[in-house]
Amino acid sequence: MKRIGLIGLACVGIAGVGATAAAEPGTVRGGAAIAYRLTIDGQQVTTWTASGVVVWCESSTQAVPIDGSGAETLTVKLAKPAGISLRTGQTLSDFQGQLVARAERTGSLTKRWSAVSDRPAACTRFAPPVADEIARTTACGVFGYRLPVSLGMAAAAPALVADEPSVDRWSDVQECPWMARDISQGGALTGSAGGDVPEVRGGLLAAALAPALRAPKRIDGKPLVATATATSTQSATTEGVTLTATTTLRLTVRLESVLKIEVSIKPGKSIAGATLGMSAPNALAATGARPGGANWDGGGSGPNQTYWQAVGRGVTVQLVAPGRHRGEPPASAVVVWIKTSDRTKVTPAGIGFGSTPAEVKRAYPRGTFVRYGSAFGWWLVDGPGRRRTAFEFSRTGGGNPVRLIVLGCRPPGNPPLRLTGVVDLGRDRIVRC
């Protein structure tokens, strides 16, 4: 296996990521940091074999055959989910944390003295056994430890690497044969570039992530998943015994947005539980909205009515009541339009903030596109009746994603194309549709 060289990876026990601060759930506009939860889990399996003969006495024509084998299944997971943040389009490329490792080890090693029949008198001073020597296995079984892990860039791709554990329990061949070439001697394996091989001493193979984990433009509730896989085979012959070790690694890395996606935009019906014509008390209760100051449209030839904009959990509702009012909207106030730019709210088709024009058109093919100057455009979906759902696209977000969704009534006539030309704002009269 070609080993991956990782430069500048500090292995520390504190999970975290570089420069951006975690974002709170709610409305997040393009380019802002999104909070994610990172998890890592997987397995590394190492198998080894030892075979050969050991010279025990130069006067004997026979060497002692030795054979052994063993395996270790190392199950790892991140000690606890790590909170990180990424901006739209940013790739996860910097992380330090700790893995909880559970090792299950088996091993056997036999020195076959029973196969040695040539035992000249000159060799009796060595007091060779007659029966086979079998290594003890009292330390085999299950044990655990912590393992520092880092993610960094290697060969222009994100890669994971884990240091060796600080406690060396992996060369104790007295109690459980592990990479053993004799009953009381451990083996020596070096990598192709020299130096110790960490995966046979409790560490992990270095492995690149595929695909790279990149924060999407639209949060749809699905986790971002990448795998890190690697295989290594090392072999060395010492004093007539050949040790061979093969290791395979497979880790899964997941990024899950902490934003909880909810299907709360129902085109032509409601947004976040608020419907057109709903009374103010019910709308405020459904959305958690708090109304701003009262705005009176009375006087002159204008209508004698008051309107309020109430901002709630990622949603804004326009309330209108006949007559002149101050303070809170009365029970006679009703909803005339609703809008949202909250990433957590989507339609049953999965359309929401950050959706592309192509995605919107596929989901609602009977809509009409209307261009608005050089900056914006609208995809207008009409029905039922005079109701209209408008998806506003932004030309400044890359790919013209949806940045606003409005539910209202179709305006009468052919007004200039601005928000009042998309839905009736209800300022000329209270509109019920």
Image (cartoon, grey):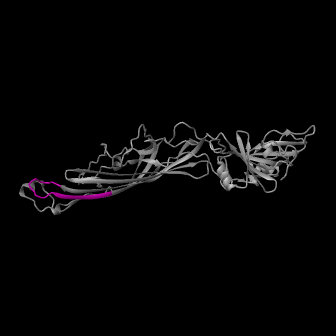
Disc count in the image? 0
Residue 113 vs residue 101: left or right? left
- Position of residue 206 relative to residue 134, above or below, is above
- Position of residue 209 relative to residue 300, above or below, is below
State yes or no: residue 155 in magenta: no
Q: Position of residue 46 (x, y in %)?
A: 35, 54
Residue under the image location 41 percent in, 40 percent down: 6
Residue extending farthest right: 300
Magenta residues, start to end: 54-70
Residue extending farthest left: 121
- Position of residue 68 relative to residue 378, above or below, is below
Residue under the image location 43 percent in, 42 percent down: 155
Q: Specify the quadrant of the image occupied by residue 113.
A: bottom left
Residue under the image location 10 percent in, 61 percent down: 118
Q: Which sits in the foreground, 222 or 375?
A: 375
Evaluate whether residue 4 shows in this view.
yes
Q: Which sits in the foreground, 428 or 94?
A: 428
